Image (cartoon, grey):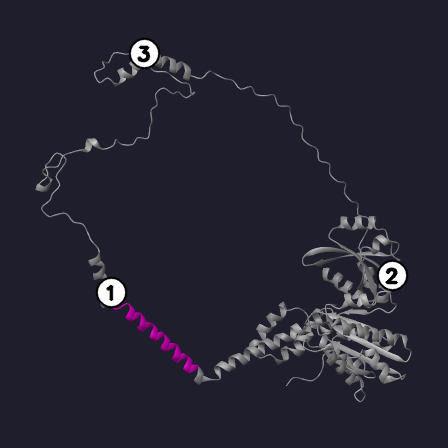
Amino acid sequence: MRDSRVLELDSQRELLERLSLLTRFGSNLVVVGGTPGSGKSWLAQRFLETWSQEKNQALLLCHPNQTEDQRRASLMEQWFPKKGFYTNTSLTDNLEQILDGESCDLILVIDDAHLLSEQLLSELWLLCVAANQCSHWSVNVVLMVHNNSVNPLLKRLSYGQELKPIELDIDLLSDSEAERFFEYLVMRYVEPDMEKQVRQSFEKVTRYPGEIMALAEQKKEKRVIVRSIVGSPLNLALIVLLFLALIAGGYWWLGQQNSPDDSRARIESLVEQTVIPTLPESSAVTSNTGSISDPTFSEAVDDSASLTPEVTDSTATVGIDDSERRVVITSDVVDALLDETATAEPIPELQELEETVIQEVVPEETSIATPDLAPVEPEVVEQPPQTQINFSFAREELLAYSPRSYTLQLAALNSLEEVQQFIDAYPVEGEVRIYPTLRNDVNWFIVTFENYPTIQAARDAVSSLPNDVQQLSPWAKAMAQVHREIESTN
């Protein structure tokens, strides 16, 4: 059985302290966002156990198949177990009816709050607004959600009001915290033969508590599967015998299909169906000058002269030349050509025809005039003027600030020229500090503005910036994150 002691890391303690301060005075709605495995469920339970013991607590674990009435009933039963309430009535109306003018100090933590409906989220927001207006009420609601998925709805609900929801993010564990978490809660319970494999997996895992804890769970699941197979030798023997019987049956079936008798019968049937033409033994073909010995061929007559002439590739035309001009040949010339008793003396008409055709076929010499081409001048490409860099990095100044303070990030650019152009295009009155960092093997240059003690002060300072700078959507950034990015490049 695992040790019941709790490992509380510095980053988690810092987040719990901020939650305690936000919920100690006044009424607020706080949204804590993080990815799956970042430890939201553990933080919710730890916050109620250690950091808010003096308050009337309620913890709601959301499930997809829950209804709104069931969730209201769960909240009211934890707050007021001996009071009557209505599940189809809003939370504010139920509190007004139960308290009847009395004071209260309530806190509600909801895990997986992104599964809540818009109706119930609206009721929670109205409850905080009503408690903020009532001096003897103190109601704080903490929502644990995936990646701030409910922020757009809460921004619409709080539009135009003084009270605003507060947003907090769960960051990755630092390398030292992740190593400590891994050694304390994982490696202490890993078998010796699996230590190397688990350590190799730890090098590739995301630095979240849930991801690190899953390394031990995966090992345990594999061990259970192996035991279920090895722990039943009788079942394993039956499976092996069944497998061997299937193999033997397959060989027997193949042997029946390919028996020698069946193959011989199929070959004989094919031979009987095939007709091979043969010549009589008494017949013999002699050479072309010989005679045929078969008496049936004695009266045969050679009629090869009546066959069609062989096809030739070359063609001959009479009376048409290449220039598509017509040549007239008289009937005397044709008769002389067809006459078998013609002598070898030349025919005057044919000689004249040959000379005429030769004169007309020979082409006249032609010349092609080549136009004079003007020389082409090379095109001159104007080079853009280079941007002069007039700023310097402020690593030491940023590292000197408290990690609990905040700054405004104005831009994130990829080159020094872009940073200089940004400064020239958006002049801001105040302290502008720039530092380089490396993300996914890509150089980035971060432009920050001023330093503020709280995140709310940083957000309020956005309205004091020029309008063109406000359109860039500056956002409040924790100085602890700035320190980590600067140290990662050193």
From this viewpoint, which residue is outermost toward the front? 331
Task: Report helix, strand or loop for mark 3.
Answer: helix
Residue 479 lies, with reference to residue 232, above or below; the image says above
Type of amino acid at the residue the image marks with label 2: Ala
Q: Residue at x 36, y 19 (%)?
A: 319
Residue 278 percent location from the top left of the image: 16, 49
Q: Are marks 2 and 1 in contact (CB under 8 Å)?
A: no
Q: Quadrant of residue 1?
A: bottom right
Q: Residue furthest bottom?
A: 82
Q: Residue furthest right?
A: 135
Which comes before the other along the chain, label 2 or label 3?
A: 3
Residue at mark 3: 349
User: Against 338, is 16 above or below?
Assistant: below
What is the distance, in whole Å, between disc 2 and disc 1 at their CAs? 95 Å
Residue at (19%, 33%) from the top-left corner? 304
Camera-nearest label, 3 or 1: 3
Q: Amino acid at mark 3?
A: Glu
Can you say which quadrant of the picture contains the C terminus?
bottom right
Q: CA distance from mark 3 to mark 1?
A: 82 Å
Residue 263's tag is 1
Q: Which quadrant holds residue 239? A: bottom left
The residue where tag 2 is placed is 461
| Residue type of the residue flagged with mark 1 | Ser
Q: Is residue 295 visible?
A: yes
Q: Give the residue displayed 53% in from the left and 19% down from the top.
A: 368
**What stretch of residues is rendered in magenta?**
236-259
Expressed as whole percent of the image width and height from the top left, the position of residue 67 reads 71, 78
Q: Estimate the spatial distance between the alpha carbons at disc 2 and disc 3, rounded to whole Å.
A: 114 Å
Image height check: is 73 above or below 442? below
Q: How would you rate the neighbour count of disc 3 (Cα within 10 Å): few for under 14, some for 14-19, many for 20 or more? A: few
Q: Which mark is residue 373?
A: none
